[in-house]
Image: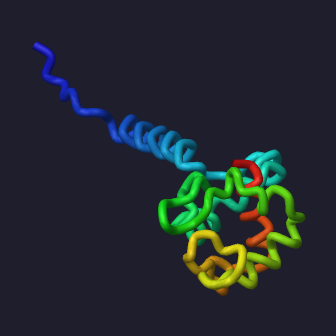
Amino acid sequence: MNTQSKRPTTAGFAATILLLAMLLSACSGGGNPPAASAAEGLDGADPYQQTCANCHGPDGKGLPNLGKDLTTSEFVHSQSDQAVLAFVKQGRLPNVPGNTTGVPMPPKGGNPALTDEQNLEIIAFIRTR
């Protein structure tokens, strides 16, 4: 009769934990994104989700009675990055001409900490939608 324990060794257990940690890191986006991501505007995904998605939706398609669909917005796609940046920095009151929703667009989406660089990253991200 074999009396050896079927419990894993300490080394085997440590190797299993290390393998799981590596797999989880790869799945969670740990590490640096490829260089192409910046060119595709993906750096703006996090600030977009944290600031703009509340009204414009996580996919940029807008939310009822809140933000417009940015993926089909003629304004967004016909203006230069600098023109869209100027609009985002200023915002829009609900009663001004051009506001078709009647909902205010706060300056910088209500996040005054956003820098011009971050807003330009968001604009690049929106243009990829």
Residue 67: which quarter of the image? bottom right
Image coordinates for residue 23, horizontal then vertical, percent: 51, 40
Look at 57% across and 62% down and name the residue there. 56
Above or below, 110 against 126 in this view is below
Image coordinates for residue 82, horizontal then vertical, percent: 88, 71
Look at 39% across and 35% down and name the residue there. 12
- Out of 32 and 106, give the one closest to the viewer: 106
Look at 80% across and 74% down and name the residue there. 85
Residue 87: which quarter of the image? bottom right
Image side of residue 73 versus residue 29, left or right: right
Q: Quadrant of the N terminus?
A: top left
Residue that sits furthest to the top in the current view = 1
Above or below, 95 against 123 in this view is below
- Out of 37 and 8, give the one closest to the viewer: 37
Image side of residue 85 versus residue 16, left or right: right
Image coordinates for residue 83, horizontal then vertical, percent: 86, 72
Residue 43: which quarter of the image? bottom right
